[in-house]
Amino acid sequence: MQDMKFFLDGLPYFKDLNQQDLDELSTLFMERKYERGVDVFQEYGEGNELFFIQSGAVKIYRTDDSREIILAILGFGDLFGEMAVLQEQYPRSASAKTMEPSTFFVLKRHDFLSLINKSPQIAIRILQAALDRLRRANEFITDLTTLDARTRIARGLLRLTEKHGLRKEGGIAIDIRLTHQQIADLTGTVRETVTKVLLDMQLQEAITITKKKIIILDIGKLEQLAGAFNDGMP
């Protein structure tokens, strides 16, 4: 229980709660653990739970003609599943699967609705998180229609670095093991293209790959490959 309270207290959604409210909130959550590669929920399924990531990583994806399209890769402190919880009449709009062994704190819809009725500010912050994810999805669609595969892959790596980067001696490690196929699904290209582009980036000494983890050696070079990533981009 103390671990849960400590985790919730550190989330921006609940930063205005006093200790008594935080104690009450922690009793509403359930802890749930998943192994790597487990479906948390499926697209078009019923959505009556909201998830907060305490550890691990999750990919949010849709399937189109038997191919996965990864919409987001989420990690510590992120929430997901909020859209279907907020819109009871609609099913899940995407699927969620663990990419690593993961621990979630889970809130049922009726408890969540009671919570936001008592504290509208929490609802606003969660809506802001949902809108931010929607904005990033729109940027992804724009990238697909306006940028070549090399630039999309570079931008995808930069976004992963912002979210999952872990500074180490010699560079910034993307702290998730990613297959070339997953990078392809995240950037709207094919595995063979990802393999060629990553090899070229290594030859340019922009990145290196160690134990299936990508390490950014030169963030400036990667930004150049990403084009105008910093011009109005997140």
Image: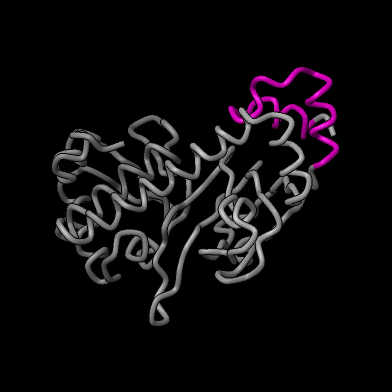
**In the image, 1: left or right of 42?**
right
Instruction: Give coordinates of residue 110: x percent, y percent.
Output: 77, 49
Along the viewing direction, whichever of 171 and 114 lies nearer the viewer: 114
Residue at screen point 59% across, 50% down: 82
* Magenta stretch prevailing secondary structure: helix
Q: Which residues are magenta?
A: 3-28
Magenta span includes 24: yes
Total labels: the figure holds: 0
Along the viewing direction, whichever of 88 and 143 lies nearer the viewer: 88
Instruction: Give coordinates of residue 135: x percent, y percent.
Output: 36, 46
As drawn, 201 above or below 120: below
| Residue 189 image-quadrant placement | bottom left
Residue at screen point 32% across, 52% down: 138
Instruction: Give coordinates of residue 46: x percent, y percent.
Output: 66, 67
Along the viewing direction, whichever of 173 and 127 lies nearer the viewer: 127
| Residue 63 image-quadrant placement | bottom left
Q: Quadrant of the N terminus?
A: top right
Magenta span includes 224: no
As drawn, 2 above or below 96: above
Residue at screen point 70% across, 25% down: 9
Residue at screen point 76% across, 40% down: 114
Q: Quadrant of the C terminus?
A: top left
As drawn, 122 above or below 111: above
Instruction: Give coordinates of residue 17: x percent, y percent.
Output: 72, 21
Along the viewing direction, whichever of 210 and 190 lies nearer the viewer: 190
What coloring was used for the rendering? one colour
**In the image, 118: left or right of 206?**
right
